[in-house]
Image (tube, helix red, strand yellow):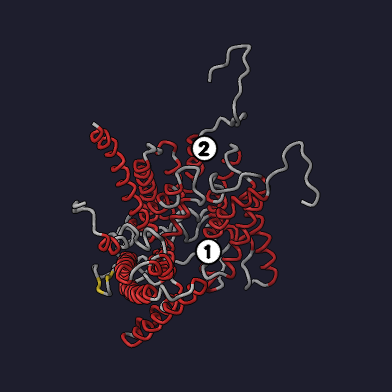
Amino acid sequence: MSDESVPTPGTDEFVKGLWRENPVFVQVLGMCPALAVSNTARNALAMGLATLFVLVGSNLVVSSLRHFVPRQVRIATYILVIATFVTVVDYAIQAISLDLHKALGAFISLIVVNCLILGRAEAFASRNHVGTALLDALGMGTGFVLALLSLGAVREILGSGSLFGVPLFHEGFQGWVVMILPAGGFFTLAGWLLLFNWLRERRATRLAALEPVGATGGGR
Amino acid sequence: MSHAPTGTLEIRTSPHVLSGYSVDTIMFNVVLALLPASAFAVWAFGWTALLTLATAVAACLATERVAGRLSGGGSTLADGSAAIAGLLYGLTLPPGLPLWMVAVGGVFGLGVGKALFGGLGMNPFNPALVGRAFVQAAFPVPMTTWVPAFAPERFAALPPSTLTPPFTAPVYDAVTGATPLALWKFERVTVSASDAAMGFIAGSTGETCAVLILLGGAYLVARNMMSWRIPVAIFASVALLSGALHALGPDVCPPPLFMLFSGGLALGAVFMATDMVSSPMTGRACVAYGVVIGVLTVVIRVWGGLPEGVMYAILFGNALTPHLDRWLQPRVYGTRAEAGS
């Protein structure tokens, strides 16, 4: 049990969202914002942070109310809680940058129906302590931010030759217009999924190759 | 296979009747059929066309090789299908397109359009057109800038755009022309149908000379290596629909002969739509598939935002192929057609 590679339960609630159960690359949840507003790294980061905030807020409230909400009306309650936080985010983004608000458009309001947030509320926050729910929300939210950033970065670098608006290449760079268009979102997501699935499969194959040796060694 | 000893019953699964053609014989003959059009392309556009075709083929072959390695399926270069896809893809590109863009489309077409679906025989869409569609979406401006045909210095110098370094936007010299379809779309000017048929027009590398393409198609049909129904259905539906629209007024739609010989219709109908993997199998389905492509081509050319629509029409037809094959299955021999169907 003292093995360092086994994380404590608390850490694991946080870490699982980053890689092992990453909301975008493993669970393939929240595709609507992931594909629609990841055309630049800035939009992707903003959308990721907004979702992270809503996720943390709603997970906290849902988890602390879990003994008071009747089962029959739980979904409606969750939506109400989530919508409250989305409204906060909506106004906050308007106050910070109107340009960003225009770029993200309806997708801010659509965080309400992001299945990632509802999924965490239903599957995790409503069954766990406030502390664990907070860690889970932070992990999942950070995983979502990282995923959106990796989509947005690829699309912006290829599509406009810049990252966060800073030009990366020489004068006369030829942008790949398709990467900024919706089709580019699908291509990029597919590319990342391909890479991650390949890595996971390779890891599983290696573990499987190691196992019989370890098993026989242990048996003798 | 050796004959079974006399007295025993030999049982085999279908197919029982073999044409004797293998993948590589057919592919070799397709190359043969494409040679006149490719040679004309080099003659009309000069070294840049040759470089475009060579790069397209090389990119497709390299992708096929790498994909074969990665999937552990061994080398599939020998059957020639990747080379054909590359040649066809190169023929659809505008001459003077930067070679790095040519390579990008080739890698995408073979990698995403074919290898990811499982390789030869598995691709739902024509890989050459997948590659071209990607390049068209990624680099719309270079894909619609046309080097004029029969430029006097075409064998002396390359257009400056051809050797653009990777990831750099090409620079064109002042002499770029418009294709006949673009001329009609934006200025309502038509060139003569005979010029379009003989290829004395601007256009994609291999699409300009309709006569040589039809010649290649006729050869394949004569060798029974291509379904004649698909091109005939496409040409007939384009001619009928554009004839009807032209009768409404010359501003609505150009004359049918112009529609038949301009743009990529001949190349698309003869060599792209008839790709054995992504086209239907049964006779009736082939006709329906051709009609869908022909009608869509006219619709896109007349009412769409782009001057040319053959590529999207064929890709759409590819998407319909499995459904057409299911809906239009031939009656099983010896059964009666059900009443009402």
Three-letter code, disc 2: Ile
Answer with the quarter of the image where residue A134 lies. Answer: bottom left
Question: Residue A154 got which mark?
Answer: none
Which comes sooner in the sequence, label 2 or label 1? 2
Asked whether, in this view, residue A14 is left or right of residue B78, the answer is left
Q: Residue at x 44, y 37 (%)?
A: B79
Chain ID for label 2? B
Q: Nearer the viewer, residue B19 or B241?
A: B19
Image spot of residue A146 (x, y percent): 30, 66
Image point (59%, 25%), residue name: B12
Q: Which residue is mark 2?
A: B26
The kind of secondary structure element at disc 2 is helix
**Residue drawn at x 37%, y 84% as measured from the top left:** A88
Residue at the spot x=59%, y=30% of the render? B18
**Residue B234 in view, yes or no:** yes
Camera sees residue A174? no
Residue under circle 1? B308
Tags 2 and 1 both on a single chain: yes
Per the model, the C-alpha gap separating discs 2 and 1 is 29 Å
